Image (cartoon, rainbow, N blue to C red):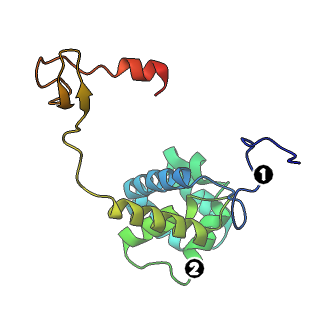
Amino acid sequence: MAKGGLDMISEKRGRGRPRECRYPEILGRAANYRGIFTNIWLKLSGPLLVARNEEEVTQVFKTQATPYAEEFVPRLAGDILNVIRERKFPKRARAQIKFLANSLAGRPNVEARTSRDICAMGLAEEKARSPHQILRKEFYVECSCGFKGPALNNACRKCGAQISLLPELLRGV
């Protein structure tokens, strides 16, 4: 005999470890950080790249990027220092901005490398999306005037009666 109903939701959600983060949040935060770093990178990059410890990173943000200091330091000071010290940290300014923003977007829930992977995956999905839009949708209608066939501009082709979507919305269809 079955222990649960047919409409019971399974406790098991899929393969692998459950996610500790939401990907859209990381993608949005990365875009936000890229915008912030783009605005302040000229003043911030020189002192930040020579910082040797977390206190120096905090001091650089407080002096060079005052409006954004609370967003990054002291919470992300250690992560910023680790990302800047990575062997693969880029040499050019635009690449540095993108690398740092994508790395910090998932912290503290996700490691920097994983955060970059999530951002790369999001960018790949965005590029794969079709640039085209639906310009016209068709309905097959049966009108009270007796017309049966495809609608034209959301209306009956014979009498021009408009298609109302409200009954379907109210009924939940």
From this view, report whether residue 141 is shown above or below residue 80: above
Q: Which mark is residue 32?
A: none
Q: Quadrant of residue 125?
A: bottom left
Q: CA distance from mark 2 to mark 1?
A: 40 Å
Q: Which mark is residue 86?
A: 2
Q: Residue drawn 53% across and 65% down? A: 118
Check disc 2 and report its element: helix, strand or loop: loop
From the image, state whether disc 2 or disc 1 is nearer to you: 1
Q: Is residue 143 found left or right of 115 in the rendered image?
A: left
| Camera-nearest residue between 166 and 116 | 166
| Camera-nearest residue between 76 and 169 | 169
| Camera-nearest residue between 77 and 104 | 104
Q: Is residue 111 found left or right of 104 in the rendered image?
A: right
User: Most extreme residue toward the front, as rendered?
Assistant: 146
x, y percent for residue 42: 38, 62
From this view, report whether residue 1 is shown above or below residue 93: above
Identify residue type, mark 1.
Glu
From this view, report whether residue 83 is shown above or below residue 42: below
Q: Can you see residue 39? A: yes
Q: Residue drawn 49% across and 63% down? A: 119
Q: Residue drawn 10% across and 21% down? A: 158
Few, some or many residues within 10 Å of mark 1 (<14, 14–19, 20+): few
Write down the residue under mark 1.
Answer: 11
Q: Quadrant of residue 93?
A: bottom left
Name which of mark 2 and mark 1 comes first in the sequence. Answer: 1
Q: Is residue 81 found left or right of 42 in the rendered image?
A: right
Q: Quadrant of residue 94?
A: bottom left
